[in-house]
Amino acid sequence: MKKIAAIVMAFALGAALGMLGSLSRTPHRASVSFNKIQTGIVVPVLTINVYDKSGALIYTYTKVGDLPTKNFLKWLMNTWWYSSSSIQLTNQSWTAEDGTSGSPGSGNYHAGAQATVAGVSSISLKVALGNGTATPTIDDYALENKLDEAPVTWYCFDANSTHMWIEVKATYTATSPINITEIGLLGYMNYGITTSTKWFLLFRDVVSQITLDTDQTLEVRYYIYVRYG
């Protein structure tokens, strides 16, 4: 696992350092070999970049092997389930960001729904920012203390003969000074609990304090890599 972490860390850090050559904040991807990662492994990576108000990169942080919540697997299950099929949950209940608990309803449409987040419409994923410090667990359903949130507005999926990956990105520009120590990725799900559409926490990460001054921008990327050949 140390080799896996080292290889994926090299990828994430390479992508972050690649941004030093451009202030456009467009996606950059480093060329890295994943040949030593065995098949069947799913590796999540969290990358954080902070830009000053001129667009210069001033801070970067990468965390490999993020702890998912149980909601992450249930989120996948819910996107696969159609109402004409039976469903069995060993854990019959899951909890939404608002604290509501229960089982998904047997409606006709279980895929991701869309909402308005921070003024941006048609959003199905969001990043939450907070200042909690409690150690993440698989049972977390919300940030310990949410301060603000940002919409996920960029997605990337690609695959080749050996592996596939998906990456999502959210950006947040501070309107006043803010200290951030926890970050979460949430998905909006139709028929998530009974017939209600709810936000579900998929990942929660505690990081060293990130201080944003007014007009500084935080970029959060969640990346999931799967090797199959």
Image: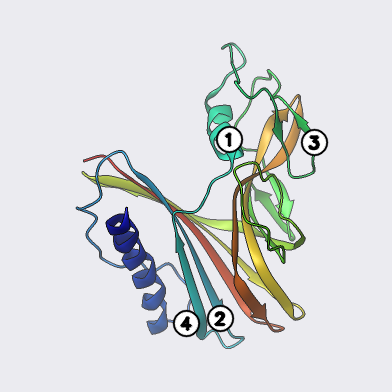
Nearest to N terminus: mark 3 or mark 2: 2
Which amino acid does the dot numbered 2 rest on? Answer: Tyr
According to the image, label 1 marks what residue? Answer: 75
Which amino acid does the dot numbered 1 rest on? Answer: Trp
According to the image, label 2 marks what residue? Answer: 51
Q: Residue at x 74, y 56 (%)?
A: 144
Circle 3 residues within 10 Å: few <14, some 14–19, many ≥20: few
| Position of 188 relative to 196 (above/below) | below
- CA–CA distance between discs 2 and 4? 9 Å
Which amino acid does the dot numbered 3 rest on? Answer: Thr
Q: Using residue 110 as the reference point, say whether residue 168 is left or right of it.
A: left
Relative image position of residue 108 (x, y in whole percent): 65, 20
Question: How many labels sit on residues?
Answer: 4
Q: Nearer the viewer, residue 143 or 167?
A: 143
Furthest residue in direction bottom, as rendered: 54
| Position of 136 relative to 78 (above/below) | below
Instruction: Say whether marks 2 and 4 touch (CB < 8 Å).
Output: yes
According to the image, label 3 marks what residue? Answer: 100
According to the image, label 4 marks what residue? Answer: 23
